[in-house]
Amino acid sequence: MKINNLFKDLEDGKCLIKLLEIVSGEKLEKPNQGRFIVHKIENLNIALNFLKSQVWLENIGAEDILSGNPKLILALIWSIILRYNFKYGDESQLRRTYKDDLLLWCQRITAGYAGLNITDFSNSWKNGMAFNALIHSQRPDLIDYNLLNPNDNFNNLNNAFELAQKHLGIAKLLDAEDIDVDDPDEKSIVTYVSTYYHIFSKMKNEAVDGKSIDKIVDSNEDSLNFSKTEIGELIEKLKNLEEAQLCPICMEHKKDTTFQCGHTVCNICAKPLVNCHICREKILSKIKIYVN
């Protein structure tokens, strides 16, 4: 069983059920082998009902997967990866932790950019400068950042989205009109920015097998696809991240610093933290540990 196109190959629910069985280790209800729409919806509901008992989901139904809705399917797969890879505890804690970690990552790689202060996943992105800074941080040849006008929201946003699609293979999940509004949608921005993380990690760590989820998710200008491997191999790569003992924030360095609460990150990510990235407990001590 293979998944070549994420938005198309999940529509009958069979692959999604199999994926959930592999990552969870649990047996789900046997899928209906029929080919009619009603059979596909039945299978998708089996998968979604199981997943909703495991992780927080919002505004996604069987019809969204059947129709190949890219934004919602991307959010669904990201939720699965988070739930069965990191296993941070209860779902509200998972949501808060992942968003905080992604925000910290954005702040780190855009530190030093003039006039840029990323504090959230809403208004901080409205004028497009943050998206352009992300791109410039990894591909300075694509943008002359100093020539951008912070007051030209529409052109800044379009510039970033088009460059990301053309040169980085990041699917254009957003339009300038979606972001240049009074209250940009946080979930949409988190989902889109996470694709930058995938691609940048892939650019930096492609030679390291199983280093990050960018080995599982392969974005291109047409769609977001699973890498063309057996589902079993795909899930094995998910598990490799945990086995490699990589820092859950940067996913680059070994975990070598533990807090009094018992949670561990790398020394680089530990330095700016005031509260634990997982349990949010105030950090009173940081202990460097030996790593092979």
Image (cartoon, helix red, strand yellow):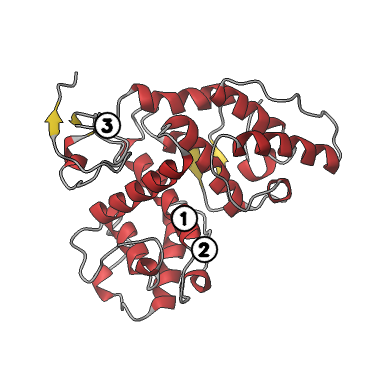
Q: At x 72% / y 51%, what residue is drawn? A: 67
Give the x, y percent position of residue 177. 52, 73
Q: Nearer the viewer, residue 130 or 29?
A: 29
Answer with left or right where residue 112 lies relative to residue 125: left
**Residue 190 in view (yes/no):** yes
The label on residue 174 is 2
Q: Crowdedness of circle 2 by 10 Å Cα count: few (<14), some, many (20+)?
A: some
Q: At x 25% / y 58%, what residue is drawn? A: 110
Tell me the quadrant of the picture where the C terminus can be found: top left
The alpha-carbon separation of the residues under discs 1 and 3 comes to 28 Å
Residue 268, placed above or below residue 58: above
Pointers 3 and 2 in contact (C-beta within 8 Å): no
Answer with left or right where residue 288 lies relative to residue 186: left
The label on residue 263 is 3
Pointers 1 and 3 in contact (C-beta within 8 Å): no
Residue 244, placed above or below residue 278: above
